[in-house]
Image: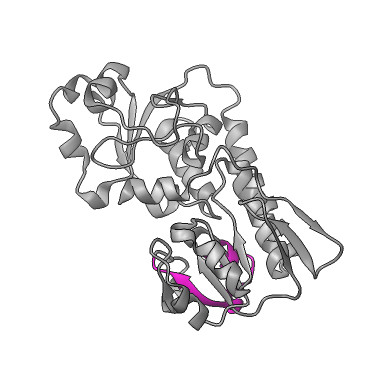
Amino acid sequence: MFVLLVVACGGNDDETSPSLTAGGPFPVTIDRSDGEQLTIEAQPQRIASLSPAATEILYAIGAGPQIAAVDNFSNYPPEATSKPKLDSFQPSVEAIVAAQPDLVFIFFDSAGIVGKLDDLGTPVLYLTAPNSVDGILQQIHTLGEATGHEAEAEALVRQMQGRIDSIESKLSGISQRPRVFHELDPTLFTVTPRDFVGDLYETLRAQNIGADAAIAAPQLSAEAVIERNPQVIVLADEAAGVTAESVKSRPGWSQIEAVQTNRIHAVDPAIVSRPGPRIVDAMETLAELLYPELFP
């Protein structure tokens, strides 16, 4: 489940970032991730968000009152939990239509749900998750224009970019890049620069031991992790029962530097693995774990 969520939320190397062309506030035309275009004629008043990241963005830019339904994983901000729920991985056309949305956000085209809603004339904004931090900022802009909250989206992006710039400024003089292993699940799936989580480590100038893989979420062997000897281990699978102590007890892992120096840290995957406004919180958290001397 942990790998499924991260991979499904990750970017697609074969798809370009959505762009927007508009002659005014509304109507607005947005390029979808499937190459089609969606024209939104008027500010949407009943939005169905089948993406927890989109839900967070909508609330952060002031579009919360326009949300009519959210997906099962939309648990932040707390107000989202009171909204009617929809299944984004096994979506029901009937359930979505019953929410009477005038705009549906979808990040994962499960069972051809995008085409099915298109056939019914239901406006669908299909945007796969970005594969970089810059892509996340761009998608915030896009959702702002799609919902009539362009100014709020721009303000949020400026605030996020300011925090990112502050982190990068502190890292400008580093000479040693720590080796890191980011564990997505107990079977040792990890991240690469092809996805936004891996891009966090690129921004933070860390040496990601999975960075040379050809796919976004590769699975490493225990032998490979031991051989690459990470200096920091980041666990995004604590909910699956993985702890620092259980990592230390894995056969052969006692020779890993991160184990020897107790630099094994659990993080909240709802923050680190979700391409929304809290991605800068994730970056700040990872910066503290990687460079405790610079981010006390």
Q: Is residue 165 left or right of residue 184?
A: right
Identity of the residue drawn at 37% across and 32% down: 218
Q: Give the colour scheme shown.
A: one colour
Q: Kindly indicate the quadrant of the structure image that contains residue 145.
A: bottom right
Direction from residue 256 to residue 91 in the image, left or right: right
Give the residues in magenta: 55-72
Looking at the rendered image, the quarter that the C terminus falls into is top left
- Residue 165 sits above or below residue 23 on the image: above
Vertical position of residue 207 compared to residue 270: above or below: above
Q: Position of residue 230 (x, y in %)?
A: 33, 23
- Where's residue 9, x and y in %? 46, 50
- Residue 152 seen in the current view: no
Quarter residue 39 falls in: bottom right
Q: Residue furthest right?
A: 23
Q: Residue furthest front?
A: 119
At 50% from the left and 39% from the top, the residue drawn is: 195
Answer whether residue 45 is visible to the viewer in this image. Answer: yes
| Left or right side of 186 for 49 | right
Query: Does the segment drawn in magenta span residue 59?
Result: yes
Where residue 66 appears, x then y in whole percent? 61, 77
- In the picture, measured across the screen, residue 8 lies left or right of residue 129, that is left
Q: Looking at the image, which residue is at 65% across and 45% down? A: 17
Tally of numbered tags: 0
Image coordinates of residue 232 in percent, x first then y, are 34, 29
Residue at position x 55%, y 41% in the image? 131
Residue toward you, 120 or 89? 120
Residue 128: say if magenta.
no
